Image: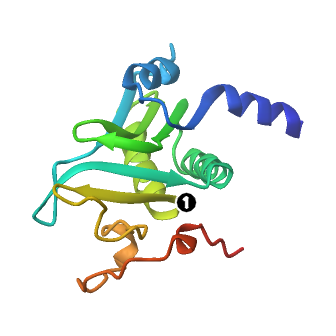
Amino acid sequence: GEAEMEQQSDVRDEVLVTNEVLSLDRAVRFVASPSAGAISTFSGTTRDTFEGRTVTKLEYEAYVPMAEKEMRSIIQQLREKWNVERVALYHRLGEVGVGETSVIVAVSSVHRPESLAAVAYGIDEIKAVVPIWKKEWYLNDSQLDSSQWKENKECCGRHHNHTQPQPQPQSQLQPHHHN
């Protein structure tokens, strides 16, 4: 019945929102399956520049229960679209230095087209809907330009004008959820 299905999907899927260093090995081991001929992964890492400025690190905050719920919902969607075996979605919180990994998507499937497509969908959806906020820390800045959550520029064609962001009061860092 319903409860059995739920249990079974938990064994095939792993969602992790954590302050720990992410392990690609762990994700690959988790999604590996005797019937899967393909394992596809994506790792998002901190790069050293953003819009021409030197970045020293990124910092991520999340509303964890909602982030996990949204990530589980993404897994459900990609399972409806593609025949995949196992899925792992990991996101790191806190400070993530240059070259370190902030997000991992791993998917196994019998043949590669499904897992490749599902991984691309998974990372795009994480960027679009999961309530995780990013701060960029720049060289020579004691604090960053703006503590606002930066929306991913690729996301949904929402392009913002490049006006100088105003510093936000602390209270506005709290997530706002509209049901």
Residue 80 vs residue 118: left or right? Answer: right
Compared with residue 129, is residue 177 higher up or lower down, i.e. above or below? Answer: below
**Residue 40's spot in the image, x, y percent?**
36, 32
Of residue 57 and residue 114, the one placed in the foreground of this image is 57
Amino acid beneath label 1 = Pro
Quadrant hosting residue 146: bottom left
Q: Residue at x 50, y 39 (%)?
A: 89
Callout 1: 10 Å neighbours few (<14), some, many (20+)?
many
**Among all residues in the image, which is located at the extreme left?**
52
* Residue position for label 1: 131
Residue 115 vs residue 53: left or right? Answer: right
Of residue 168 and residue 130, the one placed in the foreground of this image is 168
Q: Residue at x 39, y 50 (%)?
A: 59
Residue 166 vs residue 9: left or right? Answer: left
**Residue 49's spot in the image, x, y percent?**
15, 55
Quadrant where the N terminus sits is top right
Of residue 107 and residue 22, the one placed in the foreground of this image is 22
**Residue 168's spot in the image, x, y percent?**
44, 77
Compared with residue 146, is residue 78 higher up or lower down, i.e. above or below? Answer: above
Q: Residue at x 46, y 64 (%)?
A: 128
Compared with residue 106, is residue 135 higher up or lower down, i.e. above or below? Answer: below
**Among all residues in the image, which is located at the extreme front?**
142
Of residue 95 and residue 11, the one placed in the foreground of this image is 95
Quadrant hosting residue 140: bottom left
Quadrant hosting residue 70: bottom right
Callout 1: SS: loop
**Residue 92's spot in the image, x, y percent?**
45, 40
Quadrant where the C terminus sits is bottom right
